[in-house]
Image (cartoon, rainbow, N blue to C red):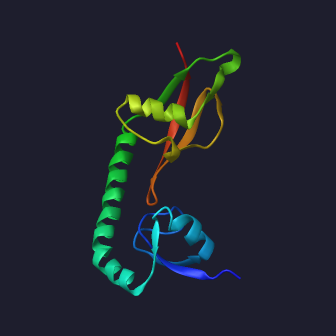
Amino acid sequence: MAKDIKVIFKEMVAGVAQPGDVKNVSAGFARNYLLPNKYAVVATPPALERLEKERSKWEAQIQQRKEEAQALAEMIKQNPLIIAVKTGENGKLFGSVTSTDVVQFLNEKGVKLDKRVVIVKDLVKTIGKFPVEFRLHPEVNVVLDLEVVPLS
């Protein structure tokens, strides 16, 4: 039976931990993923002492990332998502509108995003309004309507 290892997280691992968290994880997860990628270190007594010294630095980094995400959320909210596309009969699109299209639209407006933070919930193949979620930070999500209009 595999033994758990106590680790200190140095980086955020989505759905697992924040920097500075001390958790027990499976030995395989630690050995094969966390430790080689430097997302965590083994929680030895000297490492735990260092953690206490660095905790305020990590908390400041987490707060800074959250503030940056909130500022980005405000920038996104200021740009209505209206994308014009070529359409065929009955308002059907040639292809579909994807998260890449949303990111490209926002990049043209001066908002730089990674396409992995954009979630288009429904398959967009017709004219209309569709919800789009922006997961910018574990505590900062924005949901806006994407309006798809025919290209004039």
Task: Indicate whether 58 appears above or below 24.
Answer: above
Q: In which quarter of the image is the N terminus?
A: bottom right
Front one among 17 and 43: 43
Q: In the displayed structure, does residue 19 sit left or right of residue 133?
A: left
**Location of residue 108 in the rendering, given as x and y in whole percent from the top left corner:** 39, 28
Task: Indicate whether 60 appears above or below 2.
Answer: above
Task: Indicate whether 134 appears above or below 61.
Answer: above
**Location of residue 92 in the rendering, given as x and y in whole percent from the top left corner:** 67, 22
Which residue does the image show at 55% across and 71% down from the upper left? 30
Task: Indicate whether 93 appears above or below 34.
Answer: above
Which residue does the image show at 32% across and 69% down from the upper left? 59
Which residue does the image show at 67% across and 15% down from the upper left? 88
Q: In the displayed structure, does residue 107 sit left or right of residue 30?
A: left
Outermost top residue: 152
**Location of residue 6 in the rendering, given as x and y in whole percent from the top left corner:** 51, 81
Outermost bottom residue: 45
Which residue does the image show at 35% across and 57% down from the upper left? 65
The mark total stands at 0
**Location of residue 119 in the rendering, given as x and y in whole percent from the top left corner:** 56, 44
